[in-house]
Image: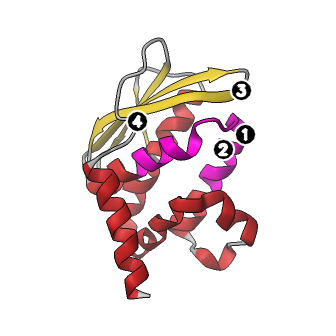
Amino acid sequence: MSDLRDLYQEVILDHSRKPRNFRVLQHARCANGHNPLCGDRVSIFLDLAGGVIREVSFQGNGCAISTASASMMTEALKGKTVEEAQRLFGLFHDLVTTGPEQATPESEEALGKLAVFEGVREFPVRVKCATLPWHTFRAAVEGGAPDPVRTE
Ligand code: ZN
């Protein structure tokens, strides 16, 4: 189990040091998120066409968890429909809050690499770091409001 944990940490560190899709998308929907508990800030850029996520990227400044979460989220969401993305957010949210006892083979397959964030639920203060990019993504879907979005 500790080997697995090391592997998880490696994946998270890799994404936080070399974030994927870390760029501005021109002419895209955009939303800004802020996690005042940790100071994380993230902007999500979203290019939607017919309910499908053609491109999704992010910019921001935050801790390793929030940066890695945003990086891996953009990889997970590209090519998905908005409905699939919302469902994945639900699974991810459960993963980092209530834990894997609610997991099914289907949910594990859907989460894929995002399962590395499982350990976050042992650190409640970090949960908002991990979910900030997802809340911000949802805000971008719902209208791309230019005002900062707070996680609840
Ligand atoms: Zn953070």
Lower position in the chain sequence, tag 3 or tag 4: 4
Does the residue at mark 3 contact the one at mark 4 (Cβ under 8 Å)?
A: no
**Marks 1/2: CA distance?**
5 Å
The residue that disc 2 covers is 86
Looking at the rendered structure, the kind of residue marked 4 is: Asn
Q: Residue at x 42, y 52 (%)?
A: 69
**Marks 4/2: CA distance?**
20 Å
Q: How crowded is mark 2: few (under 14 residues within 10 Å), some or many (20 or more)?
A: some
Bounds of the magenta segment: 69-90
Q: Does the magenta stretch include residue 71?
A: yes
Q: Residue at x 57, y 74 (%)?
A: 99
Q: Which mark is residue 21?
A: 4
x, y percentage for residue 128? 41, 55
Q: How crowded is mark 4: few (under 14 residues within 10 Å), some or many (20 or more)?
A: some
In what element is the residue under mark 2? helix
Does the residue at mark 1 contact the one at mark 2 (Cβ under 8 Å)?
A: yes
The residue that disc 1 covers is 83
Task: Check mark 3 vs ligand 1: CB closer than 8 Å? yes or no.
Answer: no
Front tag of 1 and 4 = 4
Does the residue at mark 1 contact the one at mark 3 (Cβ under 8 Å)?
A: yes
